[in-house]
Every structure is written in structure tokens, then in C-alpha cells.
Image (cartoon, grey):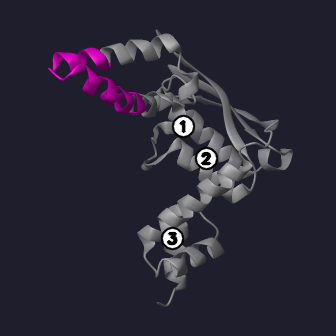
Amino acid sequence: MQITSQMVKELRDKTNAGMMDCKKALAETGGESEKAIDLLRQKGLAVARKRANRTTSEGMIETYIHADGKIGVMVEVGCETDFVAKNSEFRIFAKNVAIHIAAANPIAIKPEEVPKDVLERERNIFRQQGLDSGKPANIVEKMLDGKTAKFYAEVCLMGQKYVKNPDLSVQDLLNELIAKLGENISVKRFARFQIGA
């Protein structure tokens, strides 16, 4: 199949991947846009995994105050070099993460950071719901893992669906940026403030 410049442009607009990466992905998938998107996301994940152990001692602190002044967020996003910390795409990512935190109100960055008492309370609720529905205890225990994974996806920043594009998680967004900029990037910490909360 002939890969046209229009096809490459459309894929680039959807993914923000480089032009040559888009062309290669379209060639590998026979011009199928959706498969090319999946391929680009997989490559981004592979690049992110390779760079995951690199130290992120540079970066920036980004802030966001919601229009009514009742919600504010500070987020620290780390990268490997000062060069990337000054990159406009890195800064846009940091701002978007701050906006996402304001809107989605995560309680942790990753599952291992969820407070143990919060997790145990949720698991007890899930367990009781299963037992109340008449399911046997051994089935209820197996269901707990699935319910816990869903809970993590709802309350952990990296697993949440990105508010500006629910087709992507925040982790997907991060993986795409790592693949594009070629450095390890991490969300290190955040604080969300809300009037009256």
C-alpha cells in the first residue's frame, strides 16, 4: 500500500510522534491508522522501560490554579537533563499533569504509594459487597484482585484516564513523551489544595 503524506500527517496529528516514526508505523501496519497508533504506543512503552532506571535529578515544579481560585496544584516532574527541563513539550506535559490532578484528584502517583489503611478499607468494602451478593468466599477473594486493580486505576495518577483524552492514561502520555524526548521522565510528587477540603 502507498503511504501518502496525508496519512502520515493525520497519524502525526493523532499521536504527536515524529514524522519518520509515523511513516514506519504505517508501512509496518499496511496503512491501517488504528494499528499504527497501537504500534507507536508499544514502541513508546519499550523506550520508557529502557530508560526507567535513569536518574531524574533535573526537572521543574509546575503549578495550576483553577479559574475560580478554589483548587490549586503543585507538581514536581523530573527529567535527566536541564536541556529537557527547558523543552516546551516537557513544560506542556507538566502543566497538563497539574491540570489533570486538579480535575481528577488522585490520592497517589502509583499503587505502591496508596496508604495501606485506605487500601484495606476499600478491600474490606469489596469483600463485604461480594459476600452480601451471595458469592462463595473463595470466589470473593479472587474478585478482590480485579476490584483492587480497578480501584488503583481510579485513584493513582499514572493509571487514571487522562482528562483531556480518555483514550490515554497519564502513563501512556508519559511514555509518549519519554519516547519523543529520549530521556527518563517521572512525576515525583504533587500536592493538591482545595478550599474547604
The disc placed on residue 158 is 1
Q: Secondary structure at mark 1?
A: helix
| Residue kind at label 1, given as amino acid type | Met
Please provide percent x and percent y for residue 127: 30, 18
Report the front residue among 70 and 190.
190
The residue positioned 40% from the left and 27% from the top of the image is 148
User: Which residue matches tag 2?
Assistant: 174
Q: Secondary structure at mark 2?
A: helix
Image quarter of residue 104: top left
Image quarter of residue 163: top left
Separation of residues labelled 1 and 2 (CA atoms): 9 Å
Residue farthest front in this picture: 138
The residue positioned 38% from the left and 33% from the top of the image is 150
User: Which residue matches tag 3?
Assistant: 11
Separation of residues labelled 1 and 3 (CA atoms): 24 Å
Please provide percent x and percent y for residue 196: 46, 9
Report the front residue among 101 and 88.
101
Q: Is residue 195 magenta?
A: no
In primary-sequence order, the first of circles 3 and 2 is: 3
The residue positioned 58% from the left and 38% from the top of the image is 97
| Residue kind at label 2, given as amino acid type | Leu
Residue farthest right in this picture: 82
Residue range corresponding to the magenta coloring: 126-149
Report the front residue among 53 and 8.
53
Image marks 1 and 2: residues in contact by CB distance under 8 Å: yes
Q: Is residue 16 above or below residue 129?
A: below
Please provide percent x and percent y for residue 187: 66, 35
Q: Nearer the viewer, mark 1 or mark 3?
A: 1
Q: Residues within 10 Å of mark 2 (few under 14, many from 20)?
A: many
